[in-house]
Image: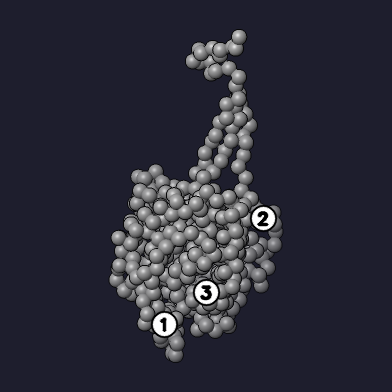
Amino acid sequence: MNTEQTLPICIAGQWRPGRGERYASRYPATGEAVAWLNAADLQDVEEAIQGAHQAFLHSGWAQRKPHERAGVLYRIAELIRLHSEELAQLQRQDNGKPINETRALVASAAGTFQFFAAACETLEETITPSRGDFVSMSVYEPMGVVAAITPWNSPIASEAQKVAPALAAGNAVVIKPAEITPLLALRLARLCEEAGLPKGLISVLPGKGSLLGDALTRHPLVKRVSFTGGTRTGKHIAHIAADKMMPVSLELGGKSPTIVLDDADLDHAVAGVLYGIFSSSGEACIAGSRLFIARALYEPFMQRLVAAAANLRVGDPADEHTQMGPLISASHRESVERYVALGLAEGGRLRLGGQRPSGGLYDQGFFYPPTILEGLSNHQQVCQEEIFGPVLVAMPFDNEAQLLEQANDSVYALAAGIWTGDYKRAWALGRRLQAGTVWINTYKQFSISTPFGGWRDSGLGREKGRLGILQYMEQKSLYWGMNEQPLAWAGVPREVAQ
């Protein structure tokens, strides 16, 4: 990629520079510019929405048979696989994730398009049980223009989870990628067009979310917003949507508890806890950032956990042996550091990490090591607020009643993990944990076929799952009159032929 050239953005099927300020997408491992582009402005937003609306009305996409729309989605999946290494390297440069992780995210995106292609062509409408002289039916129709606002931590996977079902349902989509990670959304739009998606049905608007995302959400032609990001922004979107009477999907923050019971397999538990918090450098909404350990097991488990965490490889995202890359930006690393300092000020103790690594590549990028705090209570600020970094707080518990009280004591309720050898105990505890997803003897495993979302401040609605396509459709009921006589209320007799 020519890093001096200004990349065009996609506005209603037209590829041209945005009208906003020129800025760089930078590689978090070095701070160097990967690409330059002009952000979209409010005029670009209006043009994209109007173009999407016209494409929805006149391209014929919404009227295609489901299997015909599915054919395009299958081709998108094939093209993602064909360009998988290019896309993985592009995402590595865009947000600094290790290359093995970005390869997995690209594979996930291809699988998402394939899954919703199948969901599209097999979606059934129903004849409902009749309760009168009529046949009643329930059918689904596309909404029109939908907005997909995606985060910086896993761009192509998040975009696929919104774009694939929205297109499968027959809609037009305007993507607002995170300002600092715009490259995957732009490349995905190219692949969609190459696969045969009619022009205008997809637009990509890089730039500031506070400007562009707000304008998208408020626009009267936007019929649904699917947002993944911070809770504060999600609540702002929800307020606007309430005034518009518009449905939204909000996948927001988390402060997920991971629980190690006294009968857990320690090898599995140590590996799972490490993966749950330190993969993606902790920059994940479902990161298992609160660790509750049965008191009798606490110290031996912590010793094993700290030793294993100390051996994690933090370094160059291009190296296939790297397990943790840099954080997304200098400012975000500073935020993580402030939380660690707060935890220490609240009385916490460092068992591991807490200092920037130095030397070589570490001095160029935004690296931060695996960090483990202990000596804190669940009510303290560092245990209640989302850090979004590689910081784990470990706490012992004495009994399951105390455990549940603390694990559920959070404004967030996105995910949780349980490590135990007793399946009955896991079932009972898993049902009582307040979370949208509970992992048992595993963590951070996903399936596009399984619905995902949170409770409380972790969000509204669900993505994924076979019925995820219905999030982007309106349900309509049809009644077919079968009565021989006119409706009795009107008192109009039927004329009988002589």
263 horizontally vs 138: left or right: right
Work out which quarter of the rendered image holds the N terminus and state it. bottom left
Residue 425 is tagged as: 2
Farthest front residue in view:
498
15 horizontally vs 75: left or right: left
Sequence-wise, which precedes: disc 1 or disc 2? 1
Q: What residue sits right under mark 3 in the picture?
A: 87
> Where is residue 395 shown, x and y percent of the image?
52, 65
* SS at mark 2 in the image: helix
70 to 470, vertically: above or below:
below
Q: Amino acid at mark 1?
A: Asn
Residue 244 is tagged as: none
Q: Nearer the viewer, residue 136 or 484?
A: 484
| Quarter where residue 202 is shown | bottom left
Q: What residue sits right under mark 1 in the picture?
A: 2
Q: Nearer the viewer, mark 2 or mark 3?
A: 3
- Name the residue located 40 percent from the left edge and 52 percent from the top edge: 53
Q: Nearer the viewer, residue 375 or 317?
A: 317
Q: Amino acid at mark 3?
A: Leu
| Quarter where residue 447 is shown | bottom right
- Name the residue located 62 percent from the left edge and 56 percent from the top edge: 118
Q: Nearer the viewer, residue 40 or 57?
A: 57
> Where is residue 111 shown, x and y percent of the image?
60, 64
